[in-house]
Amino acid sequence: MNILLQSFFHPGPGKWNFEIAFRWRVKMAEFHFQSRGRCRLSQQKSRLLRLRNVVSTFQENINIYRLFVVFLRRWIQTLFKAFYGPELKWNGSLKDSSFNKMG
């Protein structure tokens, strides 16, 4: 059946331009989808939806991880400030701390 359709839609020797070839391929694709039925399309759609759900949950997990990392960094910063007080600069270097006074 497929060969019969191909021979029916084939433009013939020496007549292959892009438009005719494209039309022929579109017709073959339409026949292919009709023969497979709607079931195949719904399967592909559900597969895409499932993939999108996986990606969105992955993005949510990444956002939660980022929030956790930010929380940890803030917590460590507050610990450092509690230990070293206002002597700690923003770039993280210790200015006139007790360690420097000891040595």
Image (cartoon, grey):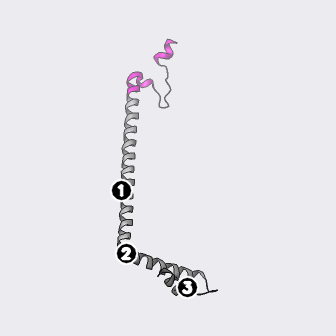
The x, y position of residue 98, in whole percent, is: 46, 16
Q: Which residue is mark 1?
A: 53
Q: Is residue 50 magenta?
A: no
Q: Residue 10: name its quadrant.
A: bottom right
Q: Residue at x 54, y 79 (%)?
A: 22
Q: Is residue 79 above or below residue 42?
A: above
Residue 98 shows which numbered tag? Answer: none
Say which of marks 1 and 2 sits in front: 2
Residue 37 shows which numbered tag? Answer: 2
Residue 10 shows which numbered tag? Answer: 3
Label 2 neighbourhood size at 10 Å, few (<14), some (14-19), many (20+)? few
The x, y position of residue 24, in whole percent, is: 52, 82
| Three-letter residue code for mark 3 | His
Residue range (magenta) = 79-103
- Labels 1 and 2: the sequence-earlier one: 2
Say which of marks 1 and 3 sits in front: 3
Label 3 neighbourhood size at 10 Å, few (<14), some (14-19), many (20+)? some
Label 3 and label 2: CA atoms lie apart by: 24 Å
Q: Is residue 90 magenta?
A: yes
State the residue lying farthest toward the right. 14
In the image shown, does 73 or 5 lie closer to the viewer?
A: 5
The x, y position of residue 56, in whole percent, is: 37, 54
Label 1 neighbourhood size at 10 Å, few (<14), some (14-19), many (20+)? few
